Amino acid sequence: MPRRLAGADVAIVGLGAAGGIASLPLARAGMKVIGLEAGGWLSPRDFGPDELRNNYRNWPQAVQKAAGEAPTVRATAADRAVQGGHPMMNAVGGTSMHYWAQSWRLNPWDFRVVSATRERYGPGRVPAGSTVEDWPFDHTELEPFYDRVEYAIGVSGQAGNVQGEIDSRGNIFEGPRRRPYPMRPLRASPFTELMGDAARRLGWNPFQGPAAIATEAYDGRPPCQYHGFCNRGGCHLRSKSSTAFTAIPKALETGNLEVVPYARVIRVVTDNDGRVTGVEYLKGNEHFFQPARVVLLASYTYENVRLLLLSASAAFPDGLANHAGQVGRHYLSHHQGAPVTALFDRDLHNWYGLPAQGAAIDEWADDNFDHSGLDFIGGANLWAHTDRRPMSAARMSTFGQTARNWGSDWKAFIMKNADRGNSSYLQKTTLPYEDNYLDLDPEVKDPFGLPVIRITARYHDNELRIARFAQDRMEQWYREAGATRIIRSGLGNAMGASTHAYGGTRMGDNAETNVVDRWGFCHEAPNLGILGASVMGTSGARNPTLTAQALAWRTADYLANNWSAVAE
Amino acid sequence: MAQKNRQRSTSAPAAEPQPASPGRRNLLKGAGLVGAAALGGSGTLIAQQGAEPAQPRIREALEVLTAAEVETLEILCDLLIPSDENGPGAREARAAHYIDRALAGPDAEDLEAFRIGLAAIEDYARRYRGRPFARLIRDRQESILLALQQNKLDGFLPSAGGFFDLLRNHAINGTFCDPYYGGNRDFVGWDMIRYPGVRIGASERDVELGADLPPNHQSAYDYPPYTKTGGNRA
Ligand SMILES: Cc1cc2nc3c(=O)[nH]c(=O)nc-3n(C[C@H](O)[C@H](O)[C@H](O)COP(=O)(O)OP(=O)(O)OC[C@H]3O[C@@H](n4cnc5c(N)ncnc54)[C@H](O)[C@@H]3O)c2cc1C
């Protein structure tokens, strides 16, 4: 029997990018919040500029909970699922500790893929088998929350559309924002300028992308020093605006947030009427029941879905909030693969860059170009960034210029070219489909004997066509910038465990096709809210975190303003 | 067993007398640094002081591999990343030494593949080339490595080609990692590819200079915040 603890107003499961954000408006509104976090506290001293440790030995994320519950993966229901890795972090701050910190808003199109496509191209253009829906609201509804998060944690960037006024130094395709970013963007570098000039020659509009990285002293944190090692290393200065250094400490200051580290939630508990009464968690050898009036699941997409499915009860025999069979459905993971890699005949000066410091092109994303003659919808954001580290540089492709990838010829090649390669990051629209879903693996268990998530998903024709189209554009861009050799990587098929995993608890007004309502609370269990990209029904062509955070803030804000309706 | 090894290899090696010069006090303060310097080549430390270059004192115990295994491994690493007319390679970087330490701890899961693979290479050399691998001429050694990469040999884990990839990965790690780990000794790997070194900040001017920036020959663990005692900045 678990030991019963004193009750809380709100229990947040997971204090990562999304849960960490939600803790702030709730604590400020005076709710007693308990943050149950599977990981512990880390500090900037834990993030030495050490590539072996951060990128090859995966310290610290490899030794943690997530590693023991990595999802299994198969392309289709006819294949056998195989367990792979798990890229996420267990710590206060979650994956916002070591993410790249690109901090994008979605474009307006991403909220209305179905109706916007019909309006512009007529019926029949949404691919068959896709379960995509419009969001229950449009971009303007989320805008105030994007703004709050950008200012609360500190996002740097160049606005492209302030209240309708277009500024071509930023993303001219973004939706109108109420005001500019709180800080200027990360600085340009010789490489981003090279790429920027090339893009302008092509008639495109390059801009420095937005990042949750301070570029000026912000809220007591120092600005980025561009030392590199940002890719899967946390920040040695706290310039990266992880929730561990921004929202969570501020929430703690109110006295209303209690953080319980090393607390592994295993179950959300419901009573016979189907109301959520709290959560069970393990800490060390102890087993606790934490009663709460409202529970917010913020444990990342795979664990959000797994916890719902593991929390079957008399009231919910098929898994919590799953009468409609929608938990695990509408799953998609961003098509981030199929990069284009280029070799230049000059040094690119990228040794001290970071992955969020780059030149972006949005011309070929979303519906920013005419798809009339094309056989797909959506597109890709093209991103040329400056991250480089010695061990990975030594592993660069030799672009067919040496017979072998070892020996004296190879060594001469990397001696000359280690700072001359670049690999693009192409984020592409990915749609949900009927046959892509998450469920519990029937065989593979975590160390506690609980089944892990099984991913059954593959990219469909629409994704593969976008990938080819984006590779063409990226190659064109690199060539214009003077690249002498180009390699295009394969497109892939099965969707592996991803850092950008969406859906599984999709948000929408229709309770038959969605798990949570427009505010983020379960249609079937109204005092259970869900935070994170698992509520998002579309991916857009850019990283999810800022959107997940804006949604988390909005859900928390709604809860604070409608406490009795939700909690009682 | 693996767990025990892991702990052993991650704890700091015993401190040794510090050749402290007042100017470098900050740098030398951490026990982690002394350990790193002792294992990563005290030549580094002395060069940083800008004082009389003394003979570096190198201490390398083999942690899990046998002397014979390491002899084969050194040659393989040297074939992969040779010391040649373009300068030092994996041998000077002490990649094989790095691999021995890695296999004793964090990469213990690869130990069996190395044991089996190194023995299979030795066996192949004796059986088909008539002498120990170490005593074959370089061309012969190279052709064995090529056959390994082309997956033409038997008796490897998970396969000949798979072992080649593992070996190459570890050799690259050992040549280009932070010198704290016992490889990339005296920063030969970083100098090879003109990586100018770990900095905790890079100005616009530094970036413009790119790889022409003078190498600073700093390990992450030369910076006090990341060594074990770096927090006590009293
Ligand atoms: C290397 C890398 C780079 C990335 N770069 C970017 C980027 O540039 N831009 C971007 O937008 N996104 C990026 N992402 C993705 C980004 O990290 C995620 O979108 C974001 O962290 C998701 O937020 P979350 O709160 O849902 O999950 P997380 O931030 O992972 O937080 C989940 C938290 O829940 C805890 N938890 C899990 N299970 C339990 C349990 N059972 N009980 C208690 N606690 C639990 C975990 O320990 C964790 O702290 C990147 C990810 C990686 C790995």
Image (cartoon, helix red, strand yellow):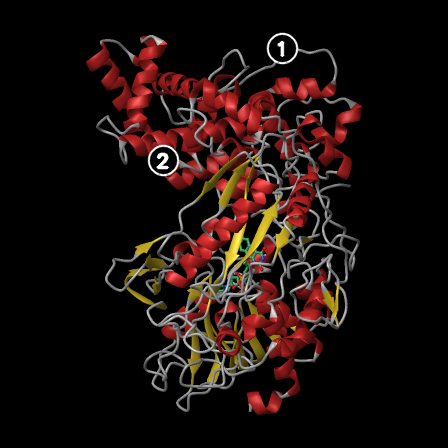
Q: Earlier in the sequence, mark 1 or mark 2?
A: 1
Q: A153 or B212, which lies in front?
A: B212
Q: Nearer the viewer, residue A521 or A538?
A: A538
Question: Residue A19, can we see it?
Answer: no
Q: Amino acid at mark 2?
A: Asp
Mark 1 vs ligand 1: CB below 8 Å: no
Mark 1 chain: B
Q: Position of residue B214 (x, y in %)?
A: 71, 24
Q: Residue at x 46, y 87 (%)?
A: A275
Pick the quarter of the image with the C terminus of chain B.
Answer: top right
Q: Residue at x 54, y 48 (%)?
A: A474
Disc ID at residue B105: none
Residue A289 appears at what percent x and percent y?
47, 75
Q: Is residue A450 visible to us here?
A: yes
Q: Residue at x 68, y 18 (%)?
A: B46
Task: Give A248 or B84, whichever is nearer the viewer.
Answer: B84
Residue B196 in picture, x, y percent from top left: 66, 29
Q: Percent x, y for residue B98?
A: 47, 27
Distance, label 1 to label 2, CA atoms, is 34 Å
Describe residue B205's horizontal placement relative to residue A531 as left or right.
Answer: right
Q: Amino acid at mark 1?
A: Gln
Q: Is residue A86 above or below residue A452?
A: above
The residue tagged 2 is B110
Query: Is B2 drawn above or below residue A258 in the view shown?
Result: above
The image quadrant where one finds the N terminus of chain B is top left
Q: Nearer the viewer, mark 1 or mark 2?
A: 2
In this picture, residue A98 sits left or right of residue A57: right
**Number of numbered discs present?**
2
Name the quadrant containing residue B120: top left
Q: Which mark is residue B55?
A: 1
Are there few (<14), some (14-19), or many (20+) residues within 10 Å of tag 2?
some
10 Å crowding of disc 1: few (<14), some (14-19), many (20+): few
